[in-house]
Amino acid sequence: MRHFSIHLIACAAIGLFGYQAHARVDEEVNKLVLSYDTPATNWDKEALPLGNGWLGCMIFGGIEQEHIQFNVDSLWLGSESDTGSYQSFGDIIMDLGAASATDYHRELDISRALQTITYSSKGTRYKRESFSSAPAEVMVFRFTADQTAAHSGRITLSDAHQAPITVEGNRISAIGDTNGKWDKRVKGSNIVLNYEAQVWVLHEGGRIQAVENGIEFEGCDSLTILVSAGTDYLNQRDKGWKQAHPHQRITDSLTQASQQTFEQLKQAHIKDYQALFNRVSIEVGNTPEPIKSLPLPERLDRYRGSNSMKKPNLSKGAADPDLEELMFQYARYLLISSSRPGSLPANLQGLWNNSNSPPWRSDYHSDVNLQMNYWFADQANLSDCFSPFAEWYHSIREVRREETQEHFGKRGIAMHAENGIFGGSTWKWSIGDASWLANNLWDHYAYTQDLQYLKTRAYPIMKDLFMFWEDHLKEIPAPDGNGTVLVAPDGFSPEHGPHEDGVSFDQQLAYDLLTNFAEASEILGVDASERAKARTMRDHLLGPQIGRWGQLQEWMVDRDKQNDKHRHLSHLIAVHPGRQISPHTTPLLAEAARVSMNARGDGSTGWSKAWKINIWARLLDGNRAHKLLREMMAGNVHSNLFNMHPPFQIDGNFGYASGVCEMLIQSHMDAIHLLPALPDAWKSGQVIGLRARGGFEVSLKWTDGQLEAAIIRSEQGKVCRLRSATPLYVTQNGRKIETVVTDRGTIEFPTLRGVEYTITTTHHNL
């Protein structure tokens, strides 16, 4: 095993990893590109996404015709009584005239959130660059060539809801509203939103001319297309969910953007994006350069050992650790692109949707999918991207309270599994869902230690949920005949099985909610009597049960079938994302969870495999987690790296990233566990900038499967607790830090806010 020198260990992140913890290795840049040698022909399998949080598009990269399908996160149907559905906004078509091309290359550089297309046609080299800018609030599409007067054609705008198209000068506009029956699943009255899209065509050389639904351009040296769109949605119920018409906001954004050069817009975009993206770097191995340079479809075929996603053959597949890293960083790219402060949260398809009747309404599905979208946000150092989740939940709180009172006659919050932007909730009541979403709220506090957020956003909802469980739980004789227990009545284990009392899904989520509520109450110093009641209720709950074949029971009744391969793993929430079951604290229950996982099998949908990666990591089985990671990559990922349920669902992309984080760092059991589930396939590597609960940023380096060193930055000055398979030694700027060994198998030491601590194994003789 290679060792660090004394001076290297003492130099914290800069010396230990060769660069600052917030910076990305320059050599990593060329790994972070999705590359193709043909245009896209299929929206969800081949086209490539851009987004600035709320305004996004899918680009096909055609030669004769460019197709840009675009979305705005708030273009929804629905009401306070109906989930509604997320809608497509429209399409921009550019007829370019070039019928054939050579040396075609299409790529998405996720280190810069920039799409580039190059090709040659009739002796001219063409280039397109595209991005969706958060600071400018516009999408930018740049068309250049190495010859003058190279661009002639037409650009047209079409609206997905048949709004009239107007053209004036260099501007194309669509102005409409959502009134109408665009999705037959939406019942009753619709909260009608007004919307608008504008396309501005800026040209150098040549001329442009307004035509029906678009603009013709002739003999132009270059074109810059600026696009913005929006609705009058506002996430405030007391204002009728509406604000001013978006026309002026859109016009102002486009006016300001048009006064900047393309390079100014691009550099401001890259700087803004990289402030988030560059926080984390990961290295789990090295793929040979010739493999990395392959077009991504060929590279995926090589990885899966087959040219068919439906029939992968991993026994013939080849290792590609850089591809596994790319998939992780792609999830971070997608979250930054679909969830920024001020936007709505990432929905079932993130930001991207080309249908007015999308699968499962492209909704906020609350029986695992929305939760999975945000499991990794804080872990992967994207805490900023979590705020849309918290603001959405806050905005619909009163609607959910009212329907819960009306339907159940109980205080607090309950949800159906389908949810929209106005608080409407449809399909089945799924009682535990609201508390499951609150797990994400609590976790965000656990990572950030943001007391203002806890007080104003997380805790009020958690208190509502405490009141719901207080009203909803009922006392029954314990199944073992020993006294009584509290159970949730008439529950349902998503998405199968009977409705009955004591379903593990509800029991485990009640446990988590009551635990988290009590801790939050204590931190804030409020509601002492409710806190005591919550702990009493939690301790009186029917807990996880081990069944007749050693499994963790999904129901209070021991009816689990060993051949049940259902995609949902609702009785394993206590393992992940919960903290009720762990090999460290409840080994018998952890073993029962392992039995259940083996029975469930490794097959299933993309998001289900992603969840299984996380659960196996929590069970400390890195090789099994990596097996599922490979199988998901081979059998559930399209050539544009979108996860397939099928159809496309973004939760699998995000769940994959969470699984990678869980394999490298865990912190849910009141200690930071370094390399808890490192697979043999990732023999040596490093990760920089992940986060752990308690307000810590963690960077790790390992060699031959063993921790070599870590850097832990304390952002809040809390006590740091560490768990590792090997003894650990702590220094700060070369000075030994005394640690205390606890009876829980961890070490702990005090920290100072803003200070970095170096962690090594004891065989480094300092």
Image (cartoon, rainbow, N blue to C red):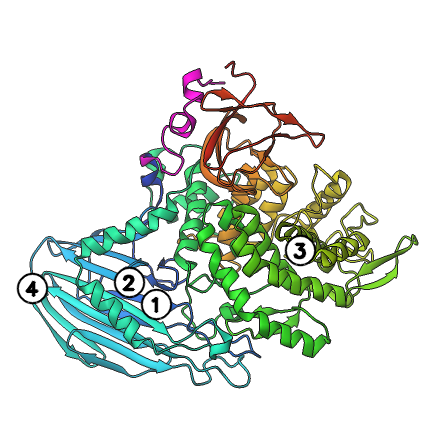
The amino acid at mark 2 is: Met
Sequence-first tag of 1 and 2: 1
Whole-percent x and y of residue 115?
A: 29, 54
Q: Which of marks 1 and 2 is in front?
A: 2
Sequence-first tag of 2 and 4: 2
Q: How crowded is mark 2: few (under 14 residues within 10 Å), some or many (20 or more)?
A: many
Q: Residues within 10 Å of mark 3 (few under 14, many from 20)?
A: many
Q: Which residue does the numbered mark 2 point to in the structure image?
A: 139
Mark 3 to mark 1 CA distance (whole Å): 41 Å
Whole-percent x and y of residue 30?
A: 31, 40
Whole-percent x and y of residue 354?
A: 40, 69
The amino acid at mark 1 is: Phe
The stretch in magenta equals: 1-26
Q: Nearer the viewer, mark 2 or mark 4?
A: 2
Whether residues under marks 3 and 2 lie with C-beta atoms below 8 angstroms apart, the answer is: no
Mark 1 to mark 4 CA distance (whole Å): 28 Å
Element type at marker 3? helix
- Tag of residue 70: 1
The amino acid at mark 3 is: Phe
Q: Which residue does the numbered mark 3 point to in the structure image?
A: 517
